[in-house]
Amino acid sequence: MRTAMLGNHARTYRLTAPAAADTVRVAREFVRAILTATEHSDLIDAARVCVSDAVTAVLPRARDGVVTVEVYVRPGRVIVKAGEASGARRRHRETRTRSEPERGLVLIRKLSHASGVEWARGGRSCKGAGKGFKEVWFELRGPREVAQ
């Protein structure tokens, strides 16, 4: 897998919230507000569905009771990550693996340009681990970016 380069032109927004059921709704509205303000309105519907699924997948693994949602915005492109707040930092992966046995992330795969799940134990990334940090990410692109 190639590591995606977000570059210096990406604007980053971060939400830290309790690992509670209403955080899913808060995350949807957070992402909607960002996409509206940054003139990415064409991505709002897909982003709201995807962030709902991503946060829902992360909630049960939030050992410290806190989750984060990070949104990276570039012209025509948005990357959203949902994860455990205390998790080890890791780079976004460019490609999705359709054979990953993740349940409940089907809509993210269908609606996004790219997506994935990252696991880590002791600060080391490891795919498919049953324990440790979980981060779900997805990338959405505007119509002009998809055509390129």
Image (spheres, grey):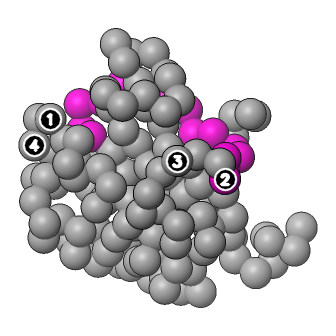
Q: CA distance from mark 2 to mark 3?
A: 8 Å
Q: CA distance from mark 4 to mark 1?
A: 5 Å
Q: How many marks?
A: 4
Q: Nearer the viewer, residue 68 or 7?
A: 68
Q: Amino acid at mark 2?
A: Arg
Classify mark 2: helix, strand or loop.
loop
Which residue is at a point 15% across and 45% down the rendered structure image? 66
Q: Which residue is mark 3?
A: 101
**Mark 1 surroundings: few (<14), some (14-19) or many (≥20) residues within 10 A:** some
Residue, x 10% and y 59% (percent of image)? 20
Of 4 and 52, the residue lying toward us: 52
> Mark 1 = which residue?
63
Q: Which residues are magenta?
A: 84-98
What's the amino acid at mark 3?
A: Pro
How crowded is the residue under tag 3: few (<14 C-alpha within 10 Å), some, or many (20+)? few
Q: Is residue 96 above or below residue 107?
A: above
Q: Are marks 2 and 3 in contact (CB under 8 Å)?
A: no
Whole-Å distance between the Cαs marked 3 and 4? 25 Å
